Amino acid sequence: MADHATHDGKAAGGSPPAVELIDLNKFFGPVHANRDVCMAVAPGTIHGIVGENGAGKSTMMGMLYGFYQASSGRIRIHGREVKITSPSHAIRQGIGMVHQHFMLVEPFTVLENVILGAEEGKLIKTSLAHARTELERLAREYGLEVDLDARVGDLSVGLQQRVEILKALYRGAEILILDEPTGVLTPQEADQLFRMLDTLRSQGRTVILITHKLREIMAITDTVSIMRRGTMVAHRRTAETSKEELAELMVGRKVLLQVDKGEAAPGERILDVNGVSYSDQTGALRLNDISFSLRRGEILGIAGVSGNGQSELLEVLSGVSRVSGGTISYLGSVIAGPGKHTNPLGMHELGVGHVAEDRHHTGMVMDFTAAENIILGYHNGPDINGPVLMDLKKVDALCAEYMDKFDVRPRNPRQAATGFSGGNQQKIVLAREIERDPELLLVGQPTRGVDIGAIEFIHKRIIELRDQGKGVLLVSVELDEILSLADRILVLFEGCIVGELTAEEADECTLGLMMAGIDPASEAAQPKGEVA
């Protein structure tokens, strides 16, 4: 296949590209983040950008959106050369951006968030009235319906993303950049998003989609550009490529997209959960009479739509939250139940590792350095402590070792967690928990925001733990991840276990029905597992 090195991005009628980047370079001090980047995006298309974490995708889009100024090179919008100096300037050029972490004020309503910074005149009531009319039109036209008077903090993540898209369209965006838009969405919400993007494309809008999920690239984009280590290595028409070729171009080597694992050899029971219930601080029942066992040498997958109790299950198993009823036993001893409670530090001391679902809030301290984060929960260990004080040189050396094993970029133990990309933050958390050789690993969303090469590596490490006779409990909203890794699968719906399948029995259709509370074997398909 020909490598369209700078493909012109022209529409069928010969109109110029909606976006054209010509020999863009960006330096951050001595770091050459983008090197001679060229790319063209045809108007009225969805153009994907893929690459590993740290490949330069976000830096490139940051220059297009005015976050950064290019060190050299040119940008053309619809054939006209522009110098974009700020996000507000980009908005005036018809460019909008939806960030991976939303830029919303949660106590404000949807309507207030949309007009924030785009008020018209001195009377806020006039701005609100005009915005309401325009947003109702946009919502109807593009399938972006959302309650304009709802408080943003009360909305699901999928609806918050709609608000961000509406904000961009309200400000006149003809070119919409989405940075890892499905990283925080359920599969159902991702499908809804793609339907919206298809509508935007059909209405002549141009969409630039930054993602590491090759299945999404193949499903929704017209063309795709591939980056590696700051350079643009190839451009492809999506219909003329494959996931395998894209993965190889991204990583620079062949990548195993299918998980290679042998048969499980389950041993003794390592975890027993008996009749566990959990109510949150408001009194709402989040887990209802949960019972299961996990054995050494197996991976137990927990499937379910986000918000159906998976997060709470991880919290009670890891000691973050107290059970309301029932018992949890580890290696035959009750560790949680009536009159008994442990905590995360105690669980670590028992040999239980925990990769939290939300790395920002419970997996890391974002203002801490990588080295400080790499010892969280293990800071009392003899390997890094002297008779009186912690040996900081040993901490840095340990962090450097873990960073090398997990290919964390940049390899700087002294850099704050906020200075790493989301995928590299995830690698730091995984390295901390896996390299401590736990007897039981509780892992939530292990590959969220992680690139294709790292996903392959993480999956191999999880399987290695299983094959070493460890127990692994895996929570993931990615059905293909559950299907690839799990030996047994439990499905949660509204806080209840609604079914158990072996890896051989499970498929995406069956799991999808069960995740919606529907019994696949029932013709009536009645919802199950209600929680009071």
Image (spheres, grey):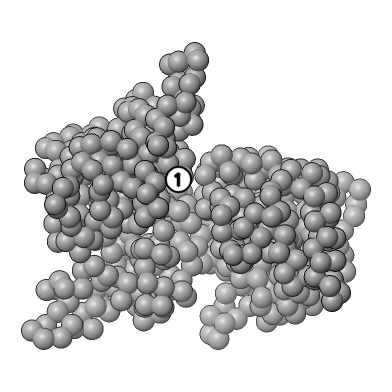
What residue is at 34 percent from the left and 33 percent from the top? 497
Quadrant of image for the N terminus: top right
What residue is at 45 percent from the left and 53 percent from the top? 448
Q: Write down the quadrant of residue 125 in the picture.
A: bottom right
Residue under label 1: 307
Front-lying residue, 362 or 279: 279
Residue 305 relative to residue 340: left or right: right
Front-lying residue, 478 or 50: 478
Q: Where is residue 213 in the image (x, y as percent from the top left)?
A: 54, 48
What residue is at 36 percent from the left and 23 percent from the top? 505
Residue 92 relative to residue 412: left or right: right
What residue is at 16 percent from the left and 61 percent from the top? 346
Residue furthest to the top: 523
Q: Is residue 262 visible?
A: no
Front-lying residue, 50 or 427: 427
Q: Is residue 146 visible?
A: yes
Residue 157 relative to residue 117: left or right: left
Quadrant of image for the C terminus: top left
Q: Position of residue 487 (x, y in %)?
A: 29, 34
Q: Residues within 10 Å of mark 1 (few under 14, many from 20)?
A: some
Q: Write down the quadrant of residue 483 in the picture.
A: top left
Q: Where is residue 132 in the image (x, y as percent from the top left)?
A: 80, 56
Residue 339 relative to residue 310: left or right: left
Q: Position of residue 339 (x, y in %)?
A: 14, 52
Q: Write down the quadrant of residue 225 in the picture.
A: bottom right
Mark 1 lies on a secondary structure that is: loop
